[in-house]
Amino acid sequence: MSATTLSFRQRGTKLLALREASIVVVALVLVIYFSVVNANFLTGPNLQTLSQFIAPSAIIACGEIMLLICGEIDLSVGQIFALAPFIMAFTDHAGLGMFVGFVFAMIVSALVGLINGAITVLLKVPSFVTTLGTLFLINGFTLTVSKGYPINTPGGQTMANIFGAAGYNEFLWAILIVVIMHMVLRHRRWGLHTIAVGGNLTGATEAGINAARIKIGNFMLTSMLGGITGILEAFRIGSTDPLAGGTNIMFLAVASGVIGGTSLAGGSGTIIGGLIGATVLGVLQDGFTLQGINAFTFDMIIGAAILIAMIANIHVGRLNRGGRS
Amino acid sequence: MSTEALRAADITKNFGNISALSGISLHVNKGEVLGILGDNGAGKSTLMKIITGYHKPSSGQMFINGEAVTLTSVDHARSLGIECVYQDLALVNTLPIYHNMFLNRELRNRFGMLDHGAMRKRAAAALDDIGVQVPSVDDEVAMLSGGQRQAIAIARAVYSNAKILLLDEPLAAMGAREAGLIIDLIQRQQARGDISIIMIMHNYAQTLEIADRIMMMQRGTVTFEGNARDTSVEALLDIVRREYRAMRAAAQ
Ligand SMILES: Nc1ncnc2c1ncn2[C@@H]1O[C@H](COP(=O)(O)OP(=O)(O)O)[C@@H](O)[C@H]1O
Ligand SMILES: [Mg+2]
């Protein structure tokens, strides 16, 4: 390894550390707080529950972060979350098996992403509006095909265990996806071009980058991650519910990304930050659930916590960068 | 007689009902520097963007090394050795200098991963070579001065092995020292003899100093074309004055 490679690593690590250190501190403070006020917080069973709070938002955050970086957002991802496991289940009921069902679910997810992307990029409708439309469309569709009732997730216990029901498996899937997406963002042209498109759309186009391809690709990626998460959760819970996911999981994913340092203005963001953001939100959800706080109070606390975490992140991040930008 | 590197024949370009170019022809030979002068809105940048494949012309034909080509994209033009420093510089503020210098031409290792180390090293070497000083190639472009940003964009184009280099107002945001470095860099490319340069300029004296040939544009047409050594700042200004008089007369 040459000296240059080494110093890049050091610098890269340092930059990453600067961006994410503040939010890691927030996460640690929360963990300490909840373990002090509740003896059950740092026990095996609760850590497993905590990991199940974190995993879904962490996976979907990977997609939303890519979209936010290239200047877009997907509000409809929580509805794909609900639709995908139904497609898998119905395909299985039709006798084609779970694997084909999974492939179909992924194809439909990718198609929804393609539609979101094409309407946004080619017809120039802001993605906020496009995906608000598809949000209702997909939700109505899922409710129609399911007649509004949950069904049992098909497949045996072994399959369910592998796909997230057992132990930390869902969390391990989340970590795997986070690692892959981190590599894509930092070490592949796709990630670099995603940043370029969000940072300077005209400039990226002048440099010959196909911005439409990048954006549409990231919409497809986000939808597919939404579909995968919906399927993991359907396996974990054992039931496939037309009302699962929804705007709740979408907001958690977007909030995870933004808390983790991804700019809503586009052009910058980190996947690792998204994982840490999802952890902060997971700790809050899990900690307050343990405390037995009532659901209405809980929403107010989460909302306030998201605001505080974001404000803290933006300003501490600014201090870390020596007051620049 | 030197060989022709690029020719654009009878190019027109309309944006809706705005006519940005109404029948422009231009050529540049191998090793030659063509300077383009003209008012704001004359269509200079639009002409550059047609040569880079960014815009499609409404009509007209391009020739590269004597062969007719129809550019389909910026990548297509790049693959033919056409490289451009756009007026807006096409830099991404949120990316470090070395990523900007290799934007859409990234170096990758054998696993297809970005080779950050090699890009940093080569970016630093290129900037060193020109004499542009930056604290570190890891710095985000947002932190640089206007002149530094322009130097980065120019270095990117020059070190891409361009055969035809287009510079849209390359000295616009520069102080005297930086402008000197860039003029020096352009003249070194010129001395190689195998690279053709088209540069859009504002300063008449600077243009006459660097360019081999001058072209003046006004409202989408060519108003003058000739060798730099056969003309002078006075003569060029005379042409501009005559144009204005004619325009005013036509308006009355
Ligand atoms: N993308 C565009 N859409 C509409 N009009 C444009 C566009 N680009 C340039 N124009 C118009 O074309 C004319 C020439 O512009 P430009 O080529 O930028 O001139 P110059 O570079 O000589 O200042 C101007 O009237 C400008 O408003
Ligand atoms: Mg211009």
Image (spheres, rainbow, N blue to C red):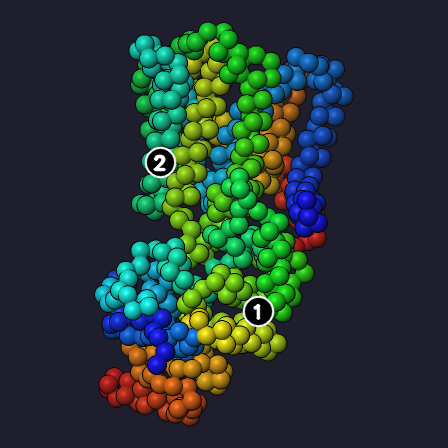
Task: Tell me, for residue A114, which label it has, or none.
Answer: 2
Image mark count: 2
Three-letter residue code for mark 1? Gly
How crowded pointer 2 is (Cα within 10 Å; few <14, some 14-19, many 20+) is rated as many
Query: Cβ of disc 1 within 8 Å of ligand 2?
Result: no
Residue at image position (50%, 8%) is A158
- Residue A19 quadrant: top right
Residue placed most toward the observer, B249 or B56: B56
Please state if A283 lies on the left or on the right of A66 as rendered: right
User: Going by the picture, which residue comes out furthest to the front?
Assistant: B1
Q: Position of residue A171 (x, y in %)?
A: 58, 21
**Left or right: where does residue A245 sit relative to residue A95?**
right
Please rate how many residues cluster around mark 1, counting C-alpha atoms within 10 Å: few if below 14, some from 14 to 19, many from 20. many
Above or below, B38 against A28 in this view is: below
Q: Amino acid at mark 2?
A: Leu
Give the position of the N terminus of chain B as an image quadrant.
Answer: bottom left
x, y percent for residue B173: 54, 71
Please state the chain letter of the residue tagged with numbered disc 2 in the rendered image.
A
**Image quarter (top left, top right, bottom left or bottom right) of the C terminus of chain B:** bottom left
Q: Secondary structure at mark 1?
A: helix
Residue pictured at 38% horizontal, 86% vertical: B227
Q: Is residue A22 visible?
A: no
Residue at (40%, 34%) from the top-left corner?
Answer: A220
Give the quarter of the image for residue A14: top right
What residue did someone put label 1 on? B147
| Chain to which mark 1 belongs | B
* Nearer the observer, A319 or B145: B145
| Residue A147 seen in render | yes
* Residue at the (43%, 29%) spot, across then down: A224
Q: How far from the left and from the top, in percent, is residue A187?
A: 55, 42
